[in-house]
Amino acid sequence: MKKTALITGASGGLGLSFVNIFARDGYDIVLVARNGNRLEDIKKEIEEKYNVNAMVVAVDLCSEDGAQKVYDATQQAGLNVDVLVNNAGFGDFGKFYKSDINKQIRMVDLNCTALMHLCHLYIPDMIKNRKGNILNVDSIAAFQAGPLMSVYYATKAFVLSFSQALTRELKGTGVKVTALCPGPIRTNFDNTADLGESGLFKNLKVWDPNVVAEFGYKNMKKGKSLCICGFVNKIIVFANRLAPRALVRNMVYNLQKVQ
Ligand SMILES: NC(=O)c1ccc[n+]([C@@H]2O[C@H](COP(=O)([O-])OP(=O)(O)OC[C@H]3O[C@@H](n4cnc5c(N)ncnc54)[C@H](OP(=O)(O)O)[C@@H]3O)[C@@H](O)[C@H]2O)c1
């Protein structure tokens, strides 16, 4: 039986790496992002390369009805979504009080609300089928406060808490939820987040998106509820749990400030 993976943020970065991995392994793909032309090109490429079927849903997931439009499109196509990859997301660098509030609100809409809404739409169908996987792309940002990227870190803390709670609620249903927590990745993220001269990408190892996606995919297949990509990132997360909060937020501030 063919399986279908729905991937948000499929037009580039980590999402495109997921697209290639799932298609390589024979999944039909639902490609979701705003850039419809780019998605159509990717659809053609993967259909030819991997002999799978792909469907394009060009939608702004920051809009109130974005997640519903995605669900309706898959329903109309008669598709059963076996894997939901909630990958679309972005950040913003700088002091919160100086930031564009509309960008912050859109970030919460995308990183939190759309992710939550898509889970709410697809989980009942997965429970009926007694199987399904949700892969929520989180970040090591989830584990502490992030001065100079305050809202982004808070959105990722939401994703972690929400994913962990779902894992417990869905025990015994056949539906598994995995939160993937990487550190910096070489994508368009730093441009969208205006990271500019921030020390974040200079102080930490920047990962290849294909390596991160493969790691998340393997852990999702194993049914892991949480996976942190990279030994150093694991140490950072572990040390954060032991260190005083004031010390941790000072360290994050110093790591991220302009250098
Ligand atoms: N890169 C990193 O350092 C890093 C580290 C940890 C976690 N992450 C997480 O990884 C995920 C993927 O980010 P990335 O690094 O691959 O960034 P990216 O290269 O900027 O890709 C973001 C993707 O999201 C889509 N997107 C953005 N706004 C959207 C909207 N309103 N509606 C629908 N789709 C939208 C973009 O496509 P369109 O522009 O076509 O809509 C694009 O496909 C995010 O959740 C991010 O928080 C990234």
Image (cartoon, rainbow, N blue to C red):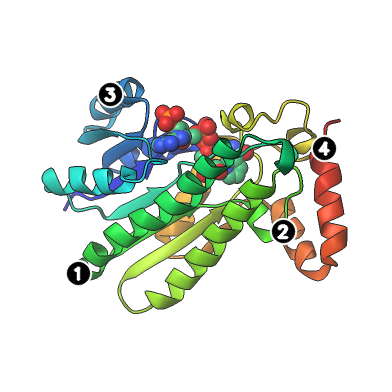
Residue occupied by mark 1:
128
Pointer 1 or 4: first along the chain: 1
Beta carbon of the mark 3 residue lies under 8 A of ligand 1: no
Q: Nearer the viewer, mark 1 or mark 4?
A: 4
Question: Counting other residues with Cα less than 10 Å from the Cα at mark 3, is it few (<14), some (14-19), or many (20 or more)?
Answer: some
Residue 234: image location, x then y, percent: 70, 58
Dividing the picture into quadrants, the one containing residue 49 is: top left
Q: In the image shown, does 11 or 131 lie closer to the viewer? A: 11
* Residue 257's disc number: 4
Residue found at x 72% / y 58%: 144
Q: What amino acid is labelled 4 in the image?
A: Lys
Mark 2: give few (<14), some (14-19) or many (20+) Cα within 10 Å.
Answer: some
Identify which residue is drawn at 52% across, 58% down: 159
Q: Which mark is residue 95?
A: none
Q: CA distance from mark 2 to mark 4?
A: 16 Å
The type of residue carrying mark 3 is: Glu
Q: Secondary structure at mark 4?
A: loop
SS state under label 3: helix
Residue drawn at 73 percent across, 50 percent down: 146
For the point 60% across and 51% down, the residue is 139
Q: CA distance from mark 1 to mark 2?
A: 36 Å
- Near mark 4 (Cα within 10 A), the count class, few <14, some 14-19 or many ≥20, is some
Residue 227 % position (x, y): 56, 59
Mark 1 to mark 3 CA distance (whole Å): 31 Å
Closer to the N terminus: mark 1 or mark 3? 3
Q: Identify the mark at residue 40; answer none if there is no mark.
A: 3
